[in-house]
Amino acid sequence: MSRVSPRAWQRMLSGRRLDLLDPSPLDVEISDIAHGLARVARWNGQTRGDHAFSVAQHCLVVEEIFRRCTGEDCRSRMMALLHDAPEYVIGDMISPFKSVVGGGYKSVEHRLEAAIHLRFGLPAHPSRELKAQIKKADAIAAFFEATELAGFSPEEARKFFGQPRGITKEMLPLQPVPAMEAQSSFLKRFAEIEAERGHRPEAPP
């Protein structure tokens, strides 16, 4: 009796079938990314408010911090917006668990990042310098999410994420919103940056 190979793909609402082990840029759609990220909760859902604080909202916060801190070109800002895009497929694994899981998770994440970036005309991966800038914006976002939403004290958050400089919570959209609103805001920001890049908006799949 022949064995059936384990399924390594996920069907998306757009109709695409994304191979998780060998993802193709041709199977990546921004509508699927926005839909998925708006329904993935940051901090394993352990945040204040009537709604989960989604990865889609987190990506918007990081891009806002990145823009304010660096003033980088629109291509770099798009990579900041998409920095957690692979999580539309693999979910948001909290850092302590990532360190336990190890290389397998990072390998899948790395391949998904490349497919997503290539789909939208970006380098497969950010340069070391750009990655460091995005990571800095990510840490600032994590500090404010931790203290405003996830129950961390400022002292505890500083220990893990550092002390933000030049950015205050009033500058950031930290209020958790319904999934459809987060999805819409993410798509709107994506379209705005695409327009700056001179790319025409895509028709829905």
Image (tube, grey):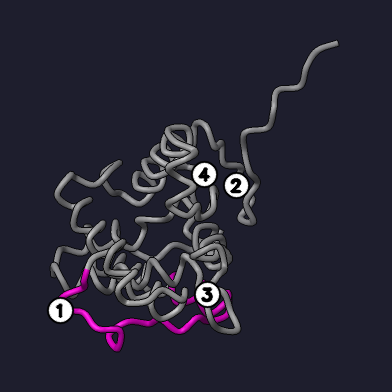
Gap between marks 2 and 4 measured at Cα: 5 Å
Q: Earlier in the sequence, mark 3 or mark 2?
A: 2
Q: Amino acid at mark 4?
A: Asp
User: In the rendered image, which quarter is residue 199 located in?
Assistant: bottom left
Q: Amino acid at mark 1?
A: Gly
**Which quadrant holds the N terminus?**
top right
The structure residue drawn at horizontal position 25% and vertical position 63%, both measured from the top left corner, is: 77
Q: Pinpoint residue 133: horizontal percent, then vertical percent.
A: 19, 58
**Mark drawn on residue 16:** 2
Q: Pinpoint residue 135: horizontal percent, then vertical percent.
A: 26, 56
**Crowdedness of circle 1 by 10 Å Cα count: few (<14), some, many (20+)?**
few
Q: Earlier in the sequence, mark 1 or mark 3?
A: 3
- Left or right, 136 with respect to 174, comes to left
Which is more foreground, mark 4 or mark 1? Answer: 1
Which is more foreground, mark 3 or mark 2? Answer: 3
**Which quadrant holds the C terminus?**
bottom right
Gap between marks 1 and 3 measured at Cα: 25 Å
